[in-house]
Amino acid sequence: MSVRIMQGDCRDLMPQHGPFDMIVADPPYGDTSLEWDERVENWHHLAVQCLKPTGSIWVFGSLRYFMAEGRHFEAAGLRYAQEIVWEKHNGSGFHADRFKRVHELAVQWYRQDAAWGEVYNEVQKTNDATARTVRRKKRPTHTGHIEAGHYVSEDGGPRIMRSVIYARSCHGRAIHPTEKPVDLLETLIRTSCPAGGLVGDFFAGSGAAGEAAIMTGRRYVGTELDLRYAAAAQGRLASILPLGAAA
Ligand SMILES: C[S@@+](CC[C@H](N)C(=O)[O-])C[C@H]1O[C@@H](n2cnc3c(N)ncnc32)[C@H](O)[C@@H]1O
């Protein structure tokens, strides 16, 4: 299986390693004054250039990040598809006078020159339906054309996964201060990258998305600017790859 983390700037290294079936991007949000938390500019259009027309980009961020940066995604030729909320078991509280923050967002974008119907999209299911019959008579006007129909669900049967996804954060065992959970990344990869497809990870950090790619049988290329994290991520992936596979 081809899995690789390169040390360096994603803007220099990633474009020539595509085309990617799916891109994961977890850039510094720029929400704090911490030294490493600086927004990265001019990567959006490079990501679009190396994304397959059937591909999509999942970007992690806070609402504040997307309010500040949203226009760059659109200017780069991307269209908003949907977002999920990652609900953590504990939070990062910067303020004692506000709600304890226990969530982050991941927003999916696809190319403006592609139709949503062409984008690879394997809807995820969970086996926790309750028994009911739903008849859909009219199409809701705000979501475009939806055929009339009905479905019957059974207790414990499959239903479409909810957009608020609980996953334990990596506190206490993390390689990186903003490490994302592998199980959450596996869900996004299964949704947006075909089996055996290529995942591009622009801001690899600890290599969590690389581990998720290995676990789901996808190929992976990531970049990480920081030497220490790049080395730690390379070690992490080498330790879970079958003996003899290149990292
Ligand atoms: C939010 S963290 C990513 C964490 C990662 N998703 C994980 O689960 O471990 C962002 C990372 O991007 C890296 N970074 C910042 N600018 C970069 C650039 N231009 N190219 C590649 N990596 C960059 C930072 O060093 C940092 O480790």
Image (tube, helix red, strand yellow):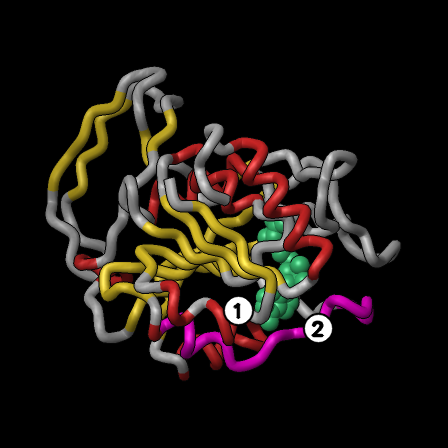
Q: Is mark 2 within 8 Å of ligand 1?
A: yes
- Compare residues 91 and 22 and report the one nearer the observer: 22
Q: Identify the magenta region.
A: 32-48
- Residue 65 visible from this viewpoint: no
Residue 87 rendering spot, x and y as whole percentages: 60, 42
Query: Disc 2 or 1, which lies upstream in sequence?
Result: 1
Q: Is residue 91 magenta?
A: no
In the displayed structure, 122 sits above or below 82; it is above
Q: What residue lies at 67% left-to-right and 39% top-to-bottom?
A: 169
In terms of image quarters, where does ligand 1 lie? bottom right
Q: Quadrant of residue 144?
A: bottom left
Residue lying at the far front in this picture: please name it. 244
Residue at the extreme right of the image, as rendered: 96
Residue appearing at x 80%, y 56% in the figure: 98
Please tell me which residue is depicted at 48% across the width and 69% down the height of the picture: 13
SS for callout 1:
helix
Drawn side of residue 98 relative to residue 210, left or right = right
- Which residue is identified by label 1? 10
Quadrant where the N terminus sits is top left
For label 1, being within 8 Å of ligand 1 is answered yes
Which mark, by number, is residue 149? Answer: none
Number of the front mark, 2 or 1: 1
